Image: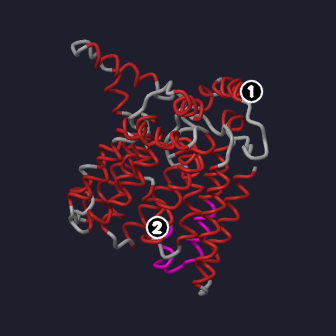
Amino acid sequence: MIYIFIATILLILGFYDIFSNDEKKKELILKAIIISLIFFLGTRGFLGWDWYFYYPSFMEGIYIYERGYMLYASLIGGIFKNYIFYQVITTTIDFVALYYIFKRYCKYPIMGFAIFFSIQGFHMEVELLRNMKAIILFLFSLKYIEERKIVPFLILNIVGISFHVSAVLYLPMYFLLNYNYKKKIILGIFVIGSFYYILNLKLIELLLNYDWKFLPTIITNKISNYKSIVPENLKRGLNIFYLERAILFYLAYKYEENRVIKNSLYIWVGIFLFTSELSVVSLRIGILFIYSAWFILAREIEKVERKNILIGIIVCLSLTRIYRSITFPGNRINYRYENALFNELNYKKREMQIIEAKSYLKESHGKELLIQY
């Protein structure tokens, strides 16, 4: 598939970023990557799953989202009411912002983009149009956590909340991410979480199965809904998902010096270890901290003793991630790439394909979601 090809090219350019000393050429390559990805993703047709809601929301206002996002979309629509134009603008904003973010936090920003593309970034840019803006605003606010400037931190994240309400979880991070936790406590939590995950313990499921009839109806209905999204065939244990997080935890624990990034990674790993039995909830919270995986993998290359081993791990993780995320039955249908500049978009045809793809959701649930962690 074209996505694996792009991921491979980005990784090869990432090798050049690491081993070359030609800073001018590397900067030129980085900017070429930004422009290419903007063209590739900005001019995509009806790709993925969530366009089915965002397209009518933008064109006709059928689906209503948070006020900040609706205002943002209406401003773009006021310039030109065309969904592809909207995608180009919003993709451009995202990638220009990510350019400055990776330049700030990674010595090897090209490799950073390669990791980003393969480990959730591609899917986030296609599917999570609102979440992506909130996450980017939070990434810009990280400097204010480090500088202890709460006012600009709050402004950026309140705007982020107006794009996606899940960003409210970022507000306490001003106090949590900059704290210097004792390494023994962090290691202890990781060990406990590892046992909880590897032994497939399910305390959350036990709580959901408890008789909560004494609670208000609205709460019991919520609990019932959460019970319905616990995958029956979800297998936890010593698997690739755990090993990936164990490696990232080790890299952060031993090598990372930036407290904010290190603590972000700990939170991301902790969410996975302790809540993955409730896959959808775990995914939606964990996605808020996925940036820590991008940063840790890209930043520790210059610090580890055996650089080639880490590069090999990055390649394996990246290609495994991008391959498995697009080869589930539903995604095979919904991720057939068509460029809007060279193909006539057919809404009805893609609507039928969405319906066909949804028939595979039960089969892939717990697999398709978990690979997105």
Q: Position of residue 144 (x, y in %)?
A: 27, 64
Image location of residue 177, percent across then percent down: 27, 59
Compared with 58, 258 (above or below) is below
Does the magenta stretch mainly form a helix, a strand or a loop? helix
Q: Secondary structure at mark 1?
A: helix
Determine the image quadrant of residue 23: bottom right
What residue is shown at x 71% (from left), y 55% (from top)? Answer: 4
Q: Residue at x 66, y 37 (%)?
A: 46
- 225 vs 88, left or right, is left
* Residue pointed to by mark 2: 100
Frontmost residue, 88 versus 158? 88
Q: Position of residue 324 (x, y in %)?
A: 65, 46
Q: Mark 1 or mark 2: which comes first in sequence?
A: 2
Up/down of 230 relative to 140, above or below: above
Extreme-bottom residue of the structure? 21
What number of labels is visible?
Answer: 2
The foreground one among 232 and 363 is 363
Query: Residue 260, image x and y in percent?
Result: 31, 64
Say whether residue 296 is left or right of residue 10.
left
Say which residue label 1 marks. Answer: 349
Q: Secondary structure at mark 2?
A: helix
Which residue lies at the image location 53% right of the left edge and 74% below the top edge?
108
- Give 294 or 312, whichever is nearer the viewer: 294
- Amino acid at circle 1: Lys
- State the CA–CA distance, disc 1 to disc 2: 38 Å
- Confirm or deny contact between disc 1 and disc 2 (CB under 8 A): no
| Amino acid type shown at disc 2 | Tyr
Q: Read off the magenta span.
A: 298-316
